[in-house]
Image (cartoon, rainbow, N blue to C red):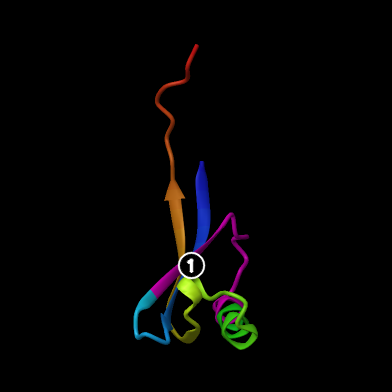
């Protein structure tokens, strides 16, 4: 079963990279929508990891992970 995640990286006010992942995104999410989401996160300022503001976008990727379960407990 494949799982899609949106992996975003921001720069904070201390010049450190901060990662944020959104699980179970729809496969129809576009690059423009993902970038707009990042812009909204920066504008609203609701996420402040370690009480340090996010100040800029660094990277954004759609990540597809496939998991194969080889063992089920009887």
Residue pictured at 52% horizontal, 56% vertical = 4
Q: Is residue 40 left or right of residue 62?
A: right
Q: According to the image, label 1 marks what residue?
A: 20
Q: Is residue 68 magenta?
A: no
Q: Where is residue 74? Give x, y as percent.
A: 50, 11
Dot 1, crowdedness within 10 Å: few (<14), some or many (≥20)? Answer: few
**Which residues are drawn in magenta?**
18-35
Residue pictured at 43% horizontal, 69% vertical = 19
Please name whichever residue, 27 or 50, is drawn nearer the observer in this view of the structure: 50
Q: Where is residue 34? Give x, y as percent.
A: 57, 76
Q: Is residue 43 left or right of residue 21?
A: right
Q: Is residue 30 above or below residue 62?
A: below
Residue pictured at 60% horizontal, 82% vertical = 45
Residue pictured at 48% horizontal, 67% vertical = 20
Q: Is residue 33 above or below residue 56?
A: above
Q: Residue furthest top?
A: 74
Q: Where is residue 71? Give x, y as percent.
A: 42, 22
Q: Where is residue 24? Give x, y as percent.
A: 59, 54
Secondary element type, mark 1: strand
Q: Which image quadrant for residue 15?
A: bottom left
Q: Residue furthest front?
A: 51
Q: Which image quadrant for residue 37?
A: bottom right
How many marks the image carries: the answer is 1
């Amino acid at each position: 079963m494949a799982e899609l995640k949106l992996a975003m990286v921001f720069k904070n006010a201390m010049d450190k990279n901060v990662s944020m992942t959104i699980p179970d995104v729809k496969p129809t999410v576009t690059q423009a929508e993902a970038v707009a989401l990042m812009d909204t996160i920066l504008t609203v300022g609701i996420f402040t990891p370690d009480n340090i503001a996010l100040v800029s976008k660094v990277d954004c990727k759609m990540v597809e992970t496939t998991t194969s379960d080889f063992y089920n407990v009887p």
